[in-house]
């Protein structure tokens, strides 16, 4: 059986490979996980900002030897076979220079070269750094050289964001803290039932189906036995996922979830969902499913069949699920900001 680390690496490479297919070169545009660099005359300094940004977020693909047209599509910049060895040597020399990059995440299999219309294109698959490796920073500058990826840009992290990554390096993350003063009854069991039903639908026959609620919550990390009283209590993660908002804010005072739908310019909000409204649980689990159902309601689903059944799940649905899940999973609930999701006619923003 693969170790957890090997599983992580294998899954990481597979996930990144899905981001780039040379046959689709002409259809790609830059986004939060794809970036092009001209690389004429050598590696651009901005490459390392993107390396840091991808590593500190969800990983991504950097394409050397390509640039953007005005419409966002890509074109090759005329690199040739002679440029390949020069660029690769410069790449490996730099990524292994601790004064330039604090950690090298790249391996030989993370780099591929292609011929596109007679020009050389080099593809770098930058993996997401593991929790204990973050922050990935450049120029030997922890607070000035740590970047994150938003949409198609690389942005310098704030001191608070860097400190959050440093705090999360701990082997036992803060979300696994046992809330010794909170009884299991403080969780919302209606949310838990809904979650278990979805789990049962997706993974019928899973061994967890046989567990009672207490053992189930313990198995998924939502509850743990306290060292203080040897009793089962919710973890911080369990409280965030399955608690009620009025209990959650006792432990996370700045906790706030906000979905804003602004699809009609004549109305301030066409729909809004806030964790503090008191009209629903306000926890992460219910927020995820409520918001996902709201943002997909206007997505057109092309007619497609597989095995005699209609397929209603498109790549757009998958991308939205991943973006929403990543937003909620990676948010800092100990920090001063909440989670805000804006649904506008031409974009959906996750903050």
Image: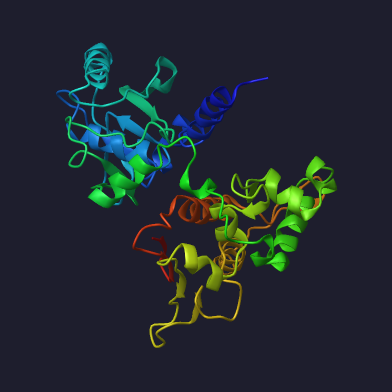
Left/right placement of residue 13 relative to residue 162 reads right
Instruction: Give the number of marks.
Output: 0
Q: Which colour scheme is used?
A: rainbow
Left/right placement of residue 155 relative to residue 184 reads left
The answer to which of 41 and 276 lies nearer the viewer is 276
Left/right placement of residue 185 relative to residue 341 reads right
Q: Does residue 301 sit above or below 247 in this rendering?
A: above
Left/right placement of residue 66 relative to residue 126 reads left
Res 117 seen here:
no
Where on the picture, by quarter, is residue 51? top left
The answer to which of 282 and 180 lies nearer the viewer is 180
The answer to which of 55 and 318 lies nearer the viewer is 55
Which quadrant is the C terminus positioned in? bottom left
Q: Position of residue 68 (x, y in %)?
A: 27, 43
Residue lying at the far front of the rendered structure: 229
What residue is rendered at 17% in x and 26% in y? 40
Res 32 seen here:
yes
Which quadrant is the N terminus positioned in? top right
Residue lying at the far bottom of the rendered structure: 266
Q: Position of residue 285 (x, y in %)?
A: 60, 61
Q: Position of residue 215 (x, y in %)?
A: 75, 48
The answer to which of 295 and 141 lies nearer the viewer is 141
Q: Where is residue 140 in the image (x, y as percent from the top left)?
A: 18, 30
What residue is rendered at 33% in x and 40% in y? 166
Q: Does residue 72 sit above or below 43 in this rendering?
A: below
Q: Does residue 190 sit above or below 133 in this rendering?
A: below
What residue is rendered at 42% in x and 31% in y? 127
What residue is rendered at 29% in x and 36% in y? 52
């Amino acid at each position: 059986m693969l170790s957890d680390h090997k599983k992580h690496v294998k899954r990481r490479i597979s996930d990144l490979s899905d981001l780039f297919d040379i046959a689709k070169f002409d259809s790609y545009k830059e986004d939060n996980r794809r970036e092009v660099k001209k690389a004429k005359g050598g590696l651009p300094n901005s490459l390392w900002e993107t390396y840091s940004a991808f590593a500190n977020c969800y990983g991504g693909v950097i394409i050397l030897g390509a640039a953007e047209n005005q419409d966002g599509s890509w074109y090759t910049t005329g690199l040739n076979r002679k440029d390949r060895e020069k660029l690769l040597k410069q790449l490996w020399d730099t990524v292994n220079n601790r004064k330039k990059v604090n950690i090298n995440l790249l391996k030989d299999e993370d780099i591929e070269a292609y011929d596109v219309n007679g020009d050389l294109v080099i593809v770098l698959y930058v993996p997401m750094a593991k929790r204990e490796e973050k922050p990935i920073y450049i120029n030997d500058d922890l607070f000035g050289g740590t970047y994150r990826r938003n949409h198609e840009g690389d942005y310098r992290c704030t001191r608070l964001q860097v400190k959050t990554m440093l705090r999360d390096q701990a082997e036992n993350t803060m979300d696994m803290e046992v809330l010794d003063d909170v009884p299991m009854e403080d969780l919302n069991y209606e949310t838990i039932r809904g979650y278990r039903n979805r789990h049962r639908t997706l993974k019928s026959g899973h061994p967890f189906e046989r567990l009672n609620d207490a053992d189930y919550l313990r198995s998924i990390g939502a509850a743990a036995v306290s060292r203080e009283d040897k009793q089962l209590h919710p973890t911080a993660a369990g409280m965030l996922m399955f608690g009620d908002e009025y209990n959650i804010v006792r432990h996370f005072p700045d906790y706030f979830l906000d979905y804003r739908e602004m699809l009609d310019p004549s109305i301030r909000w066409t729909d809004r969902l806030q964790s503090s409204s008191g009209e629903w649980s306000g926890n992460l689990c219910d927020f995820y499913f409520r918001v996902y159902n709201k943002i997909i309601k206007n997505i057109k689903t092309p007619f497609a069949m597989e095995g005699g059944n209609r397929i209603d799940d498109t790549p757009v649905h998958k991308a939205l699920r991943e973006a929403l899940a990543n937003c909620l999973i990676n948010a800092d609930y100990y920090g001063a900001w909440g989670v805000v999701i804006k649904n506008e006619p031409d974009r959906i923003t996750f903050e």
